[in-house]
Amino acid sequence: MKKIVIDPITRIEGHMRAEVEIDENNIVKEAYVSGQLFRGIEIILKDRDPRDAGLLAGRICGVCTNVHFRAAISAVEDAYGIEDPINSKIIRDLMALALFVQDHVIHFYHLHLLDFVDVTKALEADPKRTSKLGHKYSSHPYANSHAHYEEVKEKLQKFMKAGKLGLFSNGYWGHKAYKLSPEENLLLLSHYLEAMKFQSDISRAIAIFGAKTPHPQTIVVGGVTSVADMLDPQRLNQFIFIIKESKEFIDRAYLPDVKLLTQAYKEDIKAGIGESVGNFLCVGGYKFSKEDQLFEDGVIYGHNFNDIKPFEESKITEEVERAWYKDDQPYYTDLNEDGTLKTDKPDDQYSWIKAPRYDGKTMECGPLARVLVSYQKGNKFIKPFVDEFLSECDLTLMDLCTTGGRNAARAIESAYIGEYLFKFINTLVENIKYYDTQTWGKYDFDALPKNAKGRAFFEVPRGVLSHFVNIEDRKIKNYQVIAPTTWNASPKDSKNQRGPYEEALVGIKLEDPSKPLEVLRVLHSFDPCLACAVHIIDVKGKDLGHYKINASCSI
Ligand code: NI
């Protein structure tokens, strides 16, 4: 048995390390994934005014800023029983959904694509043939002229001639596991460059209602403060314009590109590479009419898609047996002498991330969980998006539970959100038309109870996010966060159950152990955000179910 250490894993948010043990056939037999950075924003939140929780919690991460901001404010509202007006809910949803799309596009092109695309091979591509290829996956392909591909190729050639690949340096170029033709490589790389513009444009859309992004400023307990933006037709039109442009990119570049990649790497998908434990968790949400919402809630056990259980908060627990905590305090145990993580004994600790479990089981959350649960629960809006992708790429639901499938789910979800975002905007415009311009519900802070407990659950780009607040004497006594990456990147637990990342790594085969590209593919497919994942709570492994269940969690 040989151990391979990858530290740091790059092209993710935050600091992560992975160690895998491989046998003589280079097959991964065991995996340890470790969160490498302790942050402790919850400590900063202690003793603060609960109304400030949002601005502080938004600093948990530099990427997922607006979802932590919102979840913190919602947890405080839940504690006090404050309901924000419908226009506030819509504006909060618009900001969150624009972030979904932004995150997914950045993830696919800038964080994950180079695991599948060989930059050096793109130089051999014929621009004319590349343009023809574009039409195979889209009837109206994005920026698909010969001249454009010629230009991209020249840019790459310049990088190469200068003896450096700039942002493409240090890749495992030439690795045998790269399967694309030169033209396929060039086409995808051209969209890698286009997606940079997409990133900045959609940031502008979020900032219209958020005042800035990252770290928007406009959500407050009781509502939102972006009332002038909401009432200015020019600002609304600007938002709509950017979303329309983004939708073009998703429909004509992102979705077709994921179809291309799915076809090219179908063998890996059919072989189940990157399959995790098969338990999926989704809390649902994003209502766009009285009855209709984007995502359904539910839990799937062991890939049993036909038996979706309802989500119950009281089944969430968290434990720290294998994480660096002791007696309610962070407690780091050093590495072995050879520089590897201490993992030999069943109680060795090896990560800053804790192990949340649902019903005692490891759970995967994220786009794949949302797509599976919502589709199987008969959400009629998502159904055509899933059906079209599965039939065009000749895949089953089981095939989606893989590295390639996670990327497919993310693209399906982006196209779906891109379409239905307009429903949210329409409702907002209708409300304004009929003189409902309320964005904030007045409350008297001094008249609120001195002590209160609240929580908020949201689906956010990477999965299920929950914030818990305990208020005593009008100050925050305790604050807890379970972020999507906490679920997915969790270490083993006291029953030695692996976290989803670890489970997905076991069984994969490495072509060349000195270039563990296959490990990166599996890990990147979850879109890790480690800054979000590491957080502290009462260390003993606590049942979070005592927080009152309130059906308004899926606003
Ligand atoms: Ni994050």
Image (tube, grey):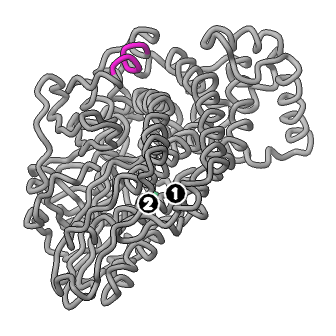
Q: Residue at x 34, y 24 (%)?
A: 381
- For the residues marked 1 and 2, what is the alpha-carbon distance in whole angstroms? 6 Å
Residue 48 screen position, x and y as percent? 35, 87
Q: Residue at x 39, y 84 (%)?
A: 44
Classify 409 as above or below 552. Answer: above
Residue 57 screen position, x and y as percent? 41, 72
Q: Secondary structure at mark 1?
A: loop
Residue neighbourhood size for the residue with mark 1, other residues' Cα within 10 Å, grouped as few (<14), some (14–19), many (≥20): some
Residue sitting nearer the eye, 472 or 322: 472
Is the residue indicated by label 2 positioned so its CB lies within 8 Å of ligand 1? yes
Please give the label number shown on residue 530. Answer: 2
Stretch in magenta: 383-388
What amino acid type is highlighted by mark number 1? Answer: Glu
Name the image quarter holding the N terminus: top left
Quarter of image, ligand 1:
bottom left
Would you say the residues marked 1 and 2 are in contact, meaning their CB atoms lie under 8 Å apart? yes
Residue 426 screen position, x and y as percent? 47, 37
Earlier residue among tags 1 and 2: 1
What amino acid type is highlighted by mark number 2? Answer: Leu
Where does label 1 land, which residue?
13
